Image (cartoon, rainbow, N blue to C red):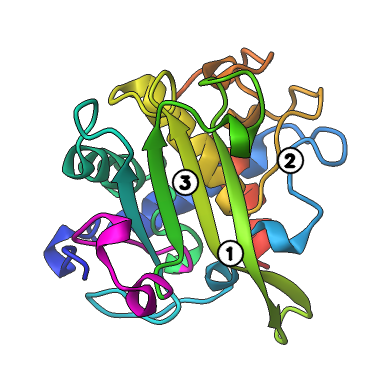
Amino acid sequence: MTDRNAGGRLPVWVPAMWAAVLLAALLTPAGPAHASHPNPSSTRHLHNMHYATSGSSAGANDEQFCVESTDTSKVSHSSARAFVKQTLTEMGAGKVWDGLGNWRIDLWATNSNCSSYPATTRNTIEIEVHYGWDWSARCGAPVGYYNCVEHDNPVWDAAQGHYDSQWAYVFLVFSSGGRLDNVGRGFINHEFGHVFGLADDNGNCNPPSLMHSTVVGYGCGNWTNWYPSPSDFQSVLNVMA
């Protein structure tokens, strides 16, 4: 199902780059509790992010994702998929979720859109990304405005001593998260922060975070990049621990 291979992975210097990113996170002044936005509910992060599978294709503990558009005249399945894949895996160390935690986050795009697979196959895909004009029935009013994430199917994780989620669904509206530009990249990375256990704005801007940035409609202007901040990466590492 996957089209990624060993040659498509980030090069061997990635671990060193991640070390530099995490050092920067450690040097960021600490803020009040919860400033880095970990979600207190363990069912708001994926089960597989605690574990890693080595290899040149998607393994049992990796995170596969499929992408689907509800209006292919606006954005095709393949264009949406290529853009999400590029945003999450191909933009370089320190800018992608892929590879975090010694590849405990190991993202693999499927070859086809989500609904093209039979249920037995679709159930093995951890993350679905859906593009559309309006997700207000899922994400709340107003119409055509909000992007959001839903987690589903809590599973008991004996090693962690809690329930976490087998599946996550990312809903992107064409007006913001569904754009094929850096605005869209910012929302994709924000929503995948939710997939990996981060919460939204809590009213505190320290440390800098994409989860409360003006880039995605919140009030903090101290992180204006479309990719996660060092504190965001560190917060997800804390969720993994």
| Residue positioned most to the bottom | 158
Q: Secondary structure at mark 2?
A: loop
| Res 117 quadrant in image | bottom left
Does the segment drawn in magenta span residue 114? yes
Instruction: Give the residue number, with chain letter if any, for mark 3.
Output: 20
**Which badge, 3 or 1, is on the more N-terminal residue?**
3
Q: CA distance from mark 3 to mark 1?
A: 26 Å
**Quick one: SS at disc 3?**
helix
Crowd tier of the residue under label 1, counting other residues whose Cα lies within 10 Å: few below 14, some 14–19, many 20 or above: many
Q: Nearer the viewer, residue 159 or 217?
A: 217
Instruction: Locate the C terminus by quadrant.
Output: bottom right
Whether residue 111 is visible to the viewer of this picture, yes or no, is yes
Q: Which residues are magenta?
A: 104-123
Of tags 3 and 1, the one toward the viewer is 1
The amino acid type, in three-letter code, at marker 2 is His
Residue 39 at what x, y percent from top left?
Answer: 75, 49
Residue at 32 percent of width and 49 percent of height:
67
- Residue drawn at (20%, 58%) of the image: 112
Q: Earlier in the sequence, mark 2 or mark 1?
A: 2
- Pointer 2: what residue? 37
Residue 145 lies in quadrant: top right
Q: Residue at x 26, y 54 (%)?
A: 113
- Residue 99: x percent and y percent? 40, 59
Q: Which residue is mark 1?
A: 46
Q: Earlier in the sequence, mark 2 or mark 3?
A: 3
| Mark-to-mark CA distance, 2 and 1 | 16 Å
Q: Is residue 109 visible?
A: no
Q: Residue 97 versus residue 19: which sits nearer the camera?
A: 97
Q: Decide: is 160 above or below 235.
A: below
Q: Amino acid at mark 1?
A: Leu
| Mark 2 burial class by Cα count in 10 Å: few <14, some 14-19, many 20+ | many
